[in-house]
């Protein structure tokens, strides 16, 4: 039997992990493309198609982009420069502490890898008190 954390990640996992974090709300009116927040600060959201994220072959806007906050520019650079990950960025996000990933490429990550990234996104946006409590409670 395969460990659930080792199976391919899915969009449902993004929702499940984000909602499992403490003090999470979904910004009102975004239920179709949720914006997950902690303390009114977004940490994961499903982006509408934009002209900066397009298929290089067809020019069509990607309609499945997910934005995840990261702790630092260094972490962002490490994720988007590693050819083993599906993370990317666009000039629109220059100077923004977040990475992008297409829902259609989530399966390139394991559920455990995705869960860690969503949890790290939450930690990057939660208050210091909430983050410290979560880290303590989870032995991290």
Image (cartoon, helix red, strand yellow):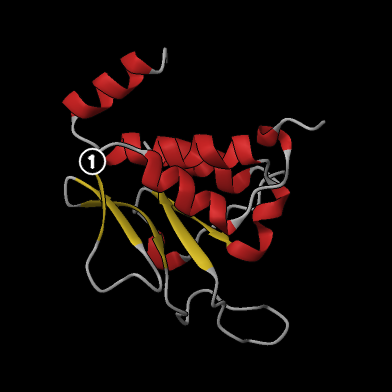
Image point 43% across, 51% down: which residue? Answer: 68
Image point 51% across, 34% down: which residue? Answer: 116
| Label 1 residue SS | loop
Residue 132 drawn at (x, y percent): 26, 20
Quadrant for the C terminus in the image: top left
Crowding near the residue tagged with mark 1, few <14, some 14–19, many ≥20 C-alpha atoms within 10 Å: few
**Residue 113 falls in image quadrant:** top right
The relative height of residue 61 versus residue 23 in the rendered view (above or below) is below
Give the total of numbered labels: 1
Residue 91 drawn at (x, y percent): 44, 66
Viewer-closest of 96 and 102: 102
The relative height of residue 137 versus residue 53 in the rendered view (above or below) is above
Which residue is at the far right?
1
**Residue 3 falls in image quadrant:** top right
Which residue is at the far front?
1
Residue 129 drawn at (x, y percent): 17, 24
Quadrant for the N terminus in the image: top right
Viewer-closest of 13 and 73: 13
Image point 34% across, 70% down: which residue? Answer: 31
Image point 51% across, 43% down: which residue? Answer: 77
Can you identify the residue that label 1 sits on?
23
Residue 120 drawn at (x, y percent): 42, 35
């Amino acid at each position: 039997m395969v460990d659930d954390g080792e199976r391919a990640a899915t969009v449902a996992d993004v929702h499940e992990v984000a909602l499992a974090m403490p003090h999470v709300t979904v910004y009102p009116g975004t239920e179709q493309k949720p914006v997950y927040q902690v303390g009114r600060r977004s940490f994961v959201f499903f982006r509408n198609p934009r002209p900066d994220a397009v298929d290089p072959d067809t020019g069509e806007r990607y309609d499945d982009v997910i934005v995840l906050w990261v702790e630092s520019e260094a972490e962002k650079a490490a994720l988007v420069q590693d050819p083993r990950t599906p993370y990317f960025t666009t000039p629109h996000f220059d100077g923004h502490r977040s990475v992008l990933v297409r829902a259609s490429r989530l399966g390139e990550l394991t559920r455990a890898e995705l869960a860690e990234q969503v949890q790290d996104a939450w930690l990057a946006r939660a208050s210091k008190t909430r983050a410290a409590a979560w880290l303590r409670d989870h032995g991290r």
